[in-house]
Image (cartoon, rainbow, N blue to C red):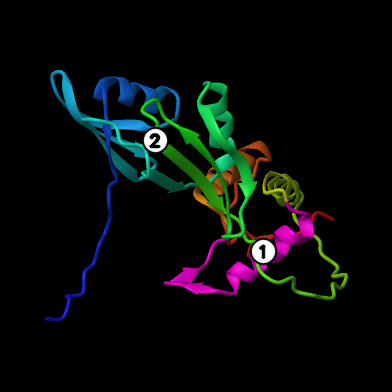
């Protein structure tokens, strides 16, 4: 019999923990998760979210040996700083891995190893190129925001511009691909407020330089 085509919209890891209420509190206060639900009195089952990823915690005998959960997030360094400041046990500090992610690992109060990482794109063979000078003039506020964004992404201004161009050349649905993670986009909104960028994405068609 041929296996059917299966559309799997989501999956949930489930971890057995000694005390569900205590585990939920640890995940909320120490790791930055958000409680979705908690069933029972005393609780025997709970769901917690990290952005849109939900895992379950159920009362039972913890079995951390051979079990681990990996989370791909927007900014692993930011979450690492938060968790470390809360005294979470660090198993492996952040580092760029050959499999294309920058990640770190911690251990929760029941002994489970949890790894958090974000994608990096500097893996693969080096590409030898020749750069040329291009006369570019940018709107003052936009240029300031771009400088801050490049620093935030730990990139040179040139590399940040190149990344943006390469992504806009790639179609994605009815639009184009974005080089920015959700975390980057939230930061960009902060930069727009910081630099007073109050025009829309099509404003460049209406830009007129001051005399």
Q: Position of residue 184 (x, y in %)?
A: 57, 47
Specify which label sits upstream in the sequence, 2 or 1.
Answer: 2
- In the image, residue 9 lies in the stretch drawn in magenta: no
- Residue 8 spot, x, y in % from top left: 25, 62
Task: Name the residue: 66% across, 69% down.
Answer: 124
Image quadrant assignment for residue 54: top left
Q: Nearer the viewer, residue 30 or 58?
A: 58
Q: Which residue is mark 2?
A: 112
User: Which stretch did the figure color magenta?
Assistant: 155-179
Secondary structure at numbered mark 2? loop
Q: Report which residue position mark 1 lands on.
A: 163
Q: Is residue 158 left or right of residue 64?
A: right
* 3D distance between C-alphas at marks 2 and 1: 37 Å
Q: Position of residue 90 (x, y in %)?
A: 54, 31
Where's residue 68, x and y in %? 39, 44
Q: Badge 2: few (under 14), some or many (20 or more) residues near its Cα, within 10 Å? A: many
């Amino acid at each position: 019999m041929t296996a059917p085509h299966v559309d799997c919209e989501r999956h949930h890891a489930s971890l057995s923990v000694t005390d569900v209420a205590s585990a939920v509190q640890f995940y909320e206060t120490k790791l930055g998760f958000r409680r979705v639900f908690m069933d029972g009195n005393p609780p025997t089952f709970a769901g917690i979210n990290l952005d849109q990823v939900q895992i379950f915690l159920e009362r039972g005998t913890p079995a951390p040996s051979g079990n681990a959960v990996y989370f791909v997030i927007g900014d692993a360094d930011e979450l690492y700083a938060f968790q470390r400041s809360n005294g979470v046990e660090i198993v492996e500090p952040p580092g760029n891995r050959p499999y294309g992610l920058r990640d770190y690992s911690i251990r929760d109060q029941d002994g489970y190893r949890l790894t958090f990482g974000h994608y990096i794109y500097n893996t693969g063979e080096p590409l030898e190129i020749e750069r040329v000078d291009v006369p570019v003039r940018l709107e003052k506020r936009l240029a300031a925001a771009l400088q801050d964004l490049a620093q935030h992404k730990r990139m040179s201004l040139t590399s940040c511009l190149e990344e943006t161009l390469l992504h806009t050349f790639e179609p994605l649905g009815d639009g184009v691909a974005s080089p920015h993670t959700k975390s980057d986009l939230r930061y960009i909104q902060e930069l727009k407020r910081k630099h007073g960028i109050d025009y829309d994405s099509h404003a460049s068609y209406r830009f007129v330089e001051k005399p």
